Image: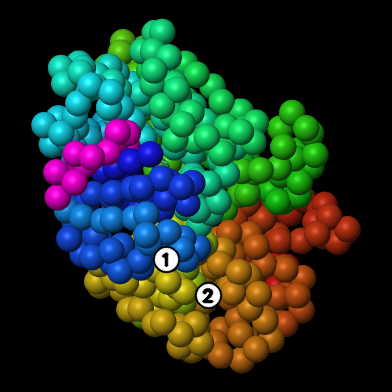
């Protein structure tokens, strides 16, 4: 089948390559000439494991262009453009989706199917369906659940398919089944529903995941107040099959180009729909998340005093490992906050320095981790890249001026780091002690955890 994918960013580029991998002839269309040029050379324009290989392997079935007229020969058109937060409110800015569909209209014919993949406020699809129907084409919504860093596998072997179609629209369902033939054949769960539900599924999924992360981070705040250990709390909660351990990683919280803006947009949409109370809790989810960033700066000030002139190595800039995406990245936000508090911040990341520098050119970046660590008064683990998790505390300790590490992702082996002479501060781990350590169960006077180096 001939397919067009309009918008070739983190979602669309992988989707285009993935559809080619499934055997389709795909044209990827984007307004960004640099992105298109890279994709046309079969090079991933951003860091996504396996994407370059996928582009190369399917070169014969892939074309990338800035010319929307190239969509003319396709029968199914995926809309994968961005839906960022509006500049002046929490609502999603749907102008790119509107513009993409508008530009596509002259090339639509009866028998064509426009498929929304972008995450949109519920009601957007119904609005777009009217203009699409004026050409004789149909519109469906097929939300995307890929995870950056695992996007290739998530695209080719998704855990479920959701088709949102107009009532009784078996033609669109059949067309989507043809697109995803091999995925459907594997008995992948497939939910066929109405347009509103399909749009809501994505918003609801992100709201749930964000809430779960903020729940454990709220527990981290309580743990900090009483000297408990949120990591062990999460382990204990996670053994309950009804709760599960996934997304209970207390730390610096969520970021990226989806969760933060999607929960804000969802809440804003609920307000427009006259049910603001339904999603009022998402404001707390957002606040808890943002407070974790401030907590890192506060912990450093507890340990170091004023940060002015203190050298701080920030390890990690991407919003999560295996990605160069720094949109709303907690790590980049922390680096900027420490800089704004007077810290001499030196930040590093295996792949996200170019994207971070484009967003914040006023941070000092070093591509080599050792260069970032050298002479540091404190180290912050801001993104849980495998290479940071695997740092040797003894060797690392030889590079720094002061052995203080804030493990903002709670990924270090606290005992090993303490044995190497480090003060280790986690988030929600007031004492960073193990339960079997008798000190972990002692109640100390308020504030003692901050003053006493019992977590060294
Ligand atoms: P992105 O910013 O990386 O990509 C969007 C692309 O659309 C850009 O390359 C931009 O140049 C292009 N574009 C904008 N207007 C266009 C137009 N009129 N015609 C053609 N191209 C145009 O964003 P993204 O992360 O890929 O997200 C895209 C959508 O997918 C968003 O709605 C997002 O919420 C959703 N989504 C993203 C992910 C993810 O992990 N990134 C996962 C699921 C859903």
State the residue at coordinates (47%, 16%).
193
The residue pinned by badge 1 equals: 56
Q: Quadrant of the C terminus?
A: bottom right
Q: Nearer the viewer, residue 262 or 66?
A: 66
| Left/right of residue 75 with respect to residue 372 in the rendered view | left
State the residue at coordinates (30%, 27%).
113
Q: Quadrant of residue 241?
A: top right
User: Does label 2 or label 1 sit earlier along the sequence?
Assistant: 1
State the residue at coordinates (16%, 44%).
68
Total marks shown come to: 2
* Structural distance between the alpha carbons of marks 2 and 1: 39 Å
Secondary structure of residue under mark 2: strand
Q: Badge 1 local density, few (<14 within 10 Å), some, or many (20+)?
A: some
| Left/right of residue 433 with respect to residue 323 in the rendered view | right
Secondary structure of residue under mark 1: helix
In the displayed structure, 186 sits above or below 408; it is above
Q: Nearer the viewer, residue 242 or 410?
A: 242
Instruction: Provide the residue span drawn in magenta.
Output: 67-81
In the displayed structure, 373 sits above or below 331; it is below
Residue 90, x across and y down, in percent = 27, 33
Residue 398, x across and y down, in percent = 61, 91
State the residue at coordinates (52%, 30%).
161
In the displayed structure, 255 sits above or below 34; it is above
Q: Quadrant of the N terminus?
A: top left
Q: Of the numbered discs in the image, which one, if any, rests on residue 379?
A: 2
| Left/right of residue 190 with respect to residue 231 in the rendered view | left
Residue 106, x across and y down, in percent = 11, 31
């Amino acid at each position: 089948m001939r397919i067009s994918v309009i918008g070739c960013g983190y979602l669309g580029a992988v989707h285009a390559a993935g559809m080619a991998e499934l055997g389709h002839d795909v044209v990827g269309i984007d307004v960004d000439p640099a992105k298109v040029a890279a994709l046309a050379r079969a090079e991933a324009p951003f860091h996504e494991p396996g994407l370059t290989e996928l582009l190369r392997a399917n070169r014969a079935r892939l074309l990338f262009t800035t010319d929307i007229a190239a969509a003319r020969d396709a029968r199914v058109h995926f809309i994968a453009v961005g839906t960022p937060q509006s500049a002046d409110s929490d609502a999603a800015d749907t102008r790119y989706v509107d513009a993409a569909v508008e530009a596509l209209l002259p090339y639509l014919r009866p028998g064509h199917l426009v498929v929304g993949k972008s995450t949109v406020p519920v009601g957007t699809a119904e609005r777009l369906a009217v203009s699409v129907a004026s050409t004789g084409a149909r519109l469906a919504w097929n939300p995307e659940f890929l995870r950056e860093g695992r996007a290739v596998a998530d695209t080719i072997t998704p855990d479920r398919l959701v088709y949102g179609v107009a009532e009784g629209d078996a033609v669109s369902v059949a067309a989507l089944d043809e697109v995803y033939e091999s995925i459907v054949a594997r008995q992948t769960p497939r939910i066929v529903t109405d347009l509103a539900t399909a749009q809501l599924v994505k918003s609801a999924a992100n709201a749930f995941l964000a809430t779960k992360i903020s729940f454990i981070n709220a527990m981290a705040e309580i743990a900090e107040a009483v000297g408990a250990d949120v990591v062990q709390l999460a382990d204990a909660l996670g053994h309950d099959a009804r709760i599960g351990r996934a997304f209970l990683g207390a730390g610096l919280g969520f970021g990226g180009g989806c969760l933060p803006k999607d929960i804000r947009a969802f809440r804003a949409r609920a307000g427009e729909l006259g049910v603001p109370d339904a999603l009022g809790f998402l404001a707390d989810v957002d606040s808890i998340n943002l407070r974790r960033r401030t907590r890192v700066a506060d912990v450093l000030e507890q340990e170091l005093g004023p940060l002015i002139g203190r050298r701080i190595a920030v390890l990690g800039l991407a919003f999560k490992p295996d990605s160069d995406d720094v949109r709303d990245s907690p790590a980049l936000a922390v680096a900027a906050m420490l800089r704004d508090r007077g810290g001499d911040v030196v930040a590093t990341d295996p792949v996200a320095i170019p994207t971070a520098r484009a967003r914040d050119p006023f941070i000092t970046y070093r591509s080599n981790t050792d260069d970032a660590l050298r002479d540091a008064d404190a180290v912050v683990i801001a993104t849980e890249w495998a290479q940071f998790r695997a740092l040797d505390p003894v060797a690392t300790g030889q590079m720094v001026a002061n052995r203080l590490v804030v493990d903002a992702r709670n990924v270090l082996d606290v005992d090993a780091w303490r044995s190497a002479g480090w003060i280790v501060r986690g988030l929600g781990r007031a004492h960073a002690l193990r339960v079997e350590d008798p000190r972990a169960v002692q109640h100390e006077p308020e504030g003692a955890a901050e003053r006493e180096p019992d977590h060294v």
